[in-house]
Image (spheres, rainbow, N blue to C red):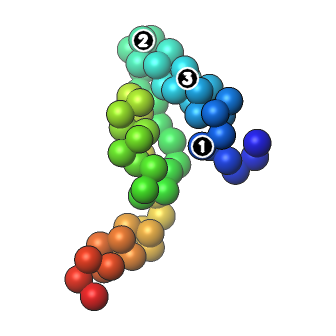
Amino acid sequence: HPGKANEPPVSTAIRKIFRSIAEAGLTSGTASSEKQMEKAKKEGCCYLYTHLNNVLKLGAENYL
């Protein structure tokens, strides 16, 4: 399922990976869209990356 992180087998695998990383006392990280960041945070991901233009667009939409 390339590029489809929301597909059930993929999202389940991602959750398991984040959990196993946290249980090992390590810090997990992932590239993410700004819309997926909250989900990744809830799943235990600590380091989140997105492109600056996505963050600026999200912030600007609330003011323009």
Identity of the residue drawn at 52% across and 26% down: 15
Q: How many marks?
A: 3
Label 1 SS: loop
| Residue 7 located left or right of residue 18 | right
Q: CA distance from mark 3 to mark 1?
A: 15 Å
Camera-near label (3 vs 1) is 1
Find residue 17 and name its label.
3
Camera-near label (1 vs 2) is 1
Q: CA distance from mark 1 to mark 2?
A: 23 Å
Which residue lies under the disc numbered 1?
A: 6
Instruction: Tell me where residue 5 appears, x and y as whole percent.
Output: 62, 43
| Residue 51 located left or right of residue 6 | left
> Which residue is situated farthest in the front direction here?
8
> Which residue is situated farthest in the bottom direction here?
64
Label 2 SS: helix
Mark positioned earlier in the residue sequence (1 or 2): 1
Which residue lies under the disc numbered 2?
A: 23
Circle 1 Cα neighbour tier, 10 Å, few/some/many (<14 / 14–19 / ≥20): few
**Which image quarter holds the C terminus?**
bottom left
Instruction: Tell me where residue 57 appears, x and y as whole percent.
Output: 39, 76
Q: Amino acid at mark 2?
A: Glu
**Residue 42 picture quarter:** top left
Q: Amino acid at mark 1?
A: Asn
Identity of the residue drawn at 64% across and 33% down: 8
Q: CA distance from mark 3 to mark 2?
A: 10 Å
